[in-house]
């Protein structure tokens, strides 16, 4: 029996933070001779990372691996303060592609720690976002991964001491709310931000998925195994009672025996071309129904360092200064002459360009 119908969640796929990061790294690839370096995967998607690798980007997990003077991008997940300052040493050209919503959590942690709070941070141990955030105030923060961790914290924090609760932006809503409720019980004066730290992209994708999961015989979540928001989508689909939930990197990983109604969504770092390929492979006999739950028109402008860089380069090109001298060719940090005066405007406001188009142009 074939797949009868595909229910396609909307929103799905790239969020504003991922759009910003991909476009910024694409600019770095265009502006500098390879290699451009990137601290951690720019976003957690194998397909996206492989496309940048093919264009000469080298991904590192230690900024000491980056040569002096080389161009270096810091990933969307946010980096520890000491990593950011080490990156900026030794003449490197550093562009930080951190999502502003992660920066907001860094700020909340810094402020609460400064006021003497113990901060319970709900997150996944070892995930880049959690590691980078907790490094903002390591002496004031405790990682909590479960209600049990909240109970342990309650036995170890002095009664009446100020306690705050923050979170990784990409958790599943249920995972977050169970821990939050337990923390409120155990710490009646708990401080929390007005809205949880779960970002709009995370909550919107989960809300759309809940609607399609309730109508589906199987749900396919497209995204990489190390993508936290993708894993959260898997949890949401399972919690919705869908009998079969599959996470795939790409269409070739789909089993051949899916039938009935299949729900499809994609994590915030998964490109739409992967969704198109999955839908094509499922080949639903009664077509595709897009289930639209909410509009999403957030936009994050390029990182300020990149805007400054592009303005400077465009100005230099205008007066004939940016083409590399022969002796400099191939040196770390060498710029290409592939930037014109008009590009400064694109760098300042690139809302009209999609990251999917940028990736397609890179591949071409
Ligand atoms: S998932 Fe949320 S926090 Fe992460 S990059 Fe996207 S918008 Fe930012």
Image (cartoon, rainbow, N blue to C red):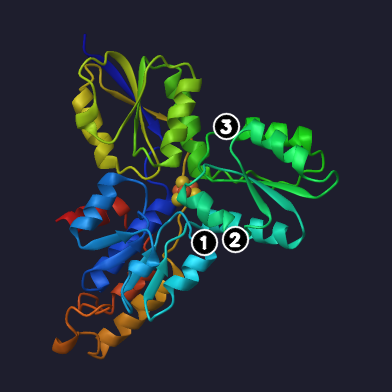
| Mark 2 to mark 3 CA distance (whole Å) | 24 Å
Q: Where does label 1 land, which residue?
A: 80
Mark 1 residue CB less than 8 A from any atom of ligand 1: no
Q: Residue at horizontal 28%, vertical 78%?
A: 333
Residue 136, which numbered label?
2
Mark 2 residue CB less than 8 A from any atom of ligand 1: no
The reply to whether dot 2 and dot 1 touch (C-beta < 8 Å) is yes
Q: Where does label 3 land, which residue?
A: 175
Q: Quadrant of the N terminus?
A: top left
Compared across the picture, whether 187 is left or right of 206 comes to: right
Indicate the secondary structure of the residue bearing disc 3. helix
Q: Is the residue marked by circle 2 packed among few (<14), some (14-19), or many (20+) residues within 10 Å?
A: many
- Residue 138: x %, y % from top left: 62, 57
Camera-nearest label, 1 or 3: 1
Q: Quadrant of the C terminus?
A: bottom left
**Which badge, 1 or 3, comes first in the chain's sequence?**
1
**Which badge, 2 or 3, comes first in the chain's sequence?**
2
- Determine whether 322 is above or below 260 in the image: below
The reply to whether dot 2 and dot 3 touch (C-beta < 8 Å) is no
């Amino acid at each position: 029996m074939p797949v009868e119908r595909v229910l396609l969640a909307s929103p799905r796929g790239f969020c504003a933070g991922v759009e910003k990061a991909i476009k910024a790294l694409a600019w770095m690839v265009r502006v500098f001779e390879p290699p451009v370096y990137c601290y951690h995967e720019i976003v957690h998607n194998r397909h996206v990372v492989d496309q940048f690798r093919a264009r000469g980007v080298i991904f590192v997990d230690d900024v000491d691996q980056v040569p002096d003077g080389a161009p270096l991008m810091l990933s969307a997940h946010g980096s520890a303060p000491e990593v950011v300052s080490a990156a900026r040493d030794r003449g490197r050209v550093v562009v930080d592609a951190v999502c502003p919503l992660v920066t907001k959590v860094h700020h909340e942690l810094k402020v609460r720690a400064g006021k003497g709070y113990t901060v319970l941070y709900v997150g996944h141990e070892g995930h880049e976002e959690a590691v980078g955030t907790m490094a903002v105030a390591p002496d004031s923060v405790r990682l909590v991964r479960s209600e049990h961790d909240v109970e342990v914290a309650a036995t170890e924090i002095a009664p009446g001491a100020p306690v705050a609760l923050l979170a990784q932006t990409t958790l599943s809503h249920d995972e977050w709310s169970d821990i939050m409720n337990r923390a409120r019980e155990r710490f009646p004066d708990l401080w929390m931000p007005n809205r949880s730290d779960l970002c709009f992209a995370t909550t919107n994708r989960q809300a759309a998925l809940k609607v399609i999961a309730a109508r589906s015989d199987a749900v396919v979540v497209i995204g990489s195994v190390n993508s936290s928001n993708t894993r959260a989508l898997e949890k949401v689909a399972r919690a919705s009672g869908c009998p079969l939930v599959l996470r795939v990197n790409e269409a070739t990983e789909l089993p051949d025996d899916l039938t009935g109604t299949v729900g499809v969504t994609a994590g915030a770092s998964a490109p739409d071309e992967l969704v198109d390929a999955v839908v094509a492979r499922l080949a639903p006999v009664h077509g595709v129904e897009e289930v639209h739950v909410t509009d999403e028109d957030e936009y994050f402008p390029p990182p300020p360092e990149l805007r400054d860089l592009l303005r400077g380069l465009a100005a230099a090109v205008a007066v004939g200064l940016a083409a590399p001298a022969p002796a400099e060719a191939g040196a770390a940090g060498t710029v290409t002459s592939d930037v014109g005066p008009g590009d400064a405007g694109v760098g300042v406001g690139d809302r009209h360009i999609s990251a999917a188009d940028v990736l397609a142009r890179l591949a071409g």
